[in-house]
Image: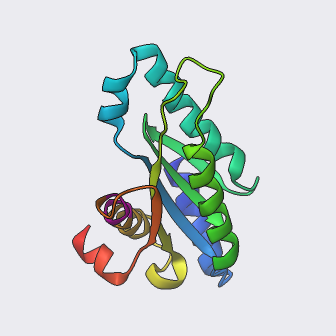
Amino acid sequence: MTSPSGRVERLRKAEAQSDQPWSILDIRLDDPADLREASTGAAFALIVDRFHQDIEETLPASADADRVADGRAMVIIRGSDESVRHHLREILTRISVIDTETAVMGIRSSASIGWATASVFGYDYDALVTAAGSAADRARAAGGDQWKRATVADLASG
């Protein structure tokens, strides 16, 4: 896990080298209040821990995921659009698998992901985070369990 200042430095270095394929992902557990209500405190903690574990285990070693809240992670990832889309699909699939061997048996979780790319927003970490957050909001508003790629409008609305 890299600190926000470490991610800023990674982006500065990428900019200096004209290294375009960098992205920020804002990954949010859908309906955390409902999940908390539908389970015990310990079961909800297991859901949250599994959510973050699923993210870590599906990302390439070069990506950096930061747990910013129980139901939210920020990721910096380098990769082509095709590669990032592959990881987005893997994350969503893995999070939605119902675990039949734990105390949270039968509870299905899902996530909404916002994806902001340096090729659209430049290398400003805060702008990328804002745009990814707005795109994650759009994914959730569209029903969740999906990802949305950030557009310039997301930066203006964030």
Q: Quadrant of the N terminus?
A: top right
> Which image quadrant: the C terminus?
bottom left
In this rendering, is residue 63 above or below 15?
above
Name the residue located 61 percent from the left edge and 52 percent from the top edge.
Answer: 93
**Picture quadrant of residue 76:** bottom right
Place of residue 49 in the rendered image (x, y in percent of width and height, measured from the top left): 55, 29
Colour pattern of the rendering:
rainbow
Range of magenta residues: 136-140
Question: Image point 44% across, 24% down: which residue?
Answer: 44
Q: Nearer the viewer, residue 65 or 143?
A: 143
Q: Is residue 133 left or right of residue 156?
A: right
Identified at 39% across, 56% down, the residue is: 144
The reply to whether residue 143 is in sight is yes
Give the answer, above or below, for where 87 lies relative to 46: below
Name the foreground residue: 1 vs 99. Answer: 99
Q: Could you tell me residue 92's position as x and y percent?
A: 56, 54
Instruction: Point out the residue furthest to the right here.
Output: 61
In which image quadrant can residue 103 be found? top right
- The dominant secondary structure in magenta is helix
Left or right: 7, with 27 as reference point: right
Q: Is residue 150 left or right of residue 123?
A: left
